[in-house]
Amino acid sequence: MFFNLPKLVITTIPYKQAEKFVSILLSKKLIACASIQKEGISIYNWKNNTVKEKEATILIKTSSKKIRKLKEAFHEHHPYDIPEFITQKIKGEKRYIDWIIKETSDD
């Protein structure tokens, strides 16, 4: 299992598109699950303008083996030109970690 560690990917997306985006990632077996957080407001600079968007934060659970393909799927299906893609290592209860790895395996 040391070669395929669990990962948490954090992203934001327009709230109305969050469920569809997660469904695509699940159907491709790129993620074990995702938690869509309540709609919030993001304010940022983009192309010399200040933008204010209603966005959802999505916490995605996956495995390190799927990170490359997940990035590709982000570029294909995420509506932003530069989608947020922050990864973190996950430590947790062994059965849950095993489940993440199983759900994202190619078997």
Image (cartoon, helix red, strand yellow):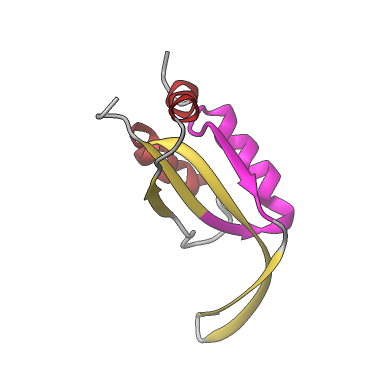
> Residue extending furthest left?
3
Residue 54: x %, y % from top left: 71, 67
Residue 99 is situated, as x and y percent measured from the top left of the image, at 49, 24
The image quadrant of residue 68 is top left
In the rendering, at what x and y percent does residue 64 appear?
Answer: 34, 36
Q: Is residue 33 rendered magenta in the image?
A: yes
Q: Is residue 34 left or right of residue 91?
A: right
User: What is the total number of numbered labels drawn onto the structure image?
Assistant: 0
Observer able to see residue 11: yes
82 in the magenta segment:
no
Query: Can the viewer see residue 75?
Result: no
Instruction: Classify residue 3 by image quadrant.
Output: top left
Residue 38 position (above or below residue 42): above
Q: Is residue 71 above or below residue 94?
A: below
Looking at the image, which residue sits at the far top?
107
Assign the C terminus to one quadrant of the image: top left
Residue at 62% across / 45% down in the picture? Answer: 35
Is 49 left or right of 8, judged from the image as shown?
A: right
- The range drawn in magenta is 11-37
Quadrant of image for the N terminus: top left
| Residue appearing at x 48%, y 24% in the figure | 95
Say which residue appears at 46% left-offset and 32% top-offset: 93
Q: Nearer the viewer, residue 23 or 56?
A: 56
Left or right relative to 105: residue 17: right
Residue found at x 53% / y 31%: 32
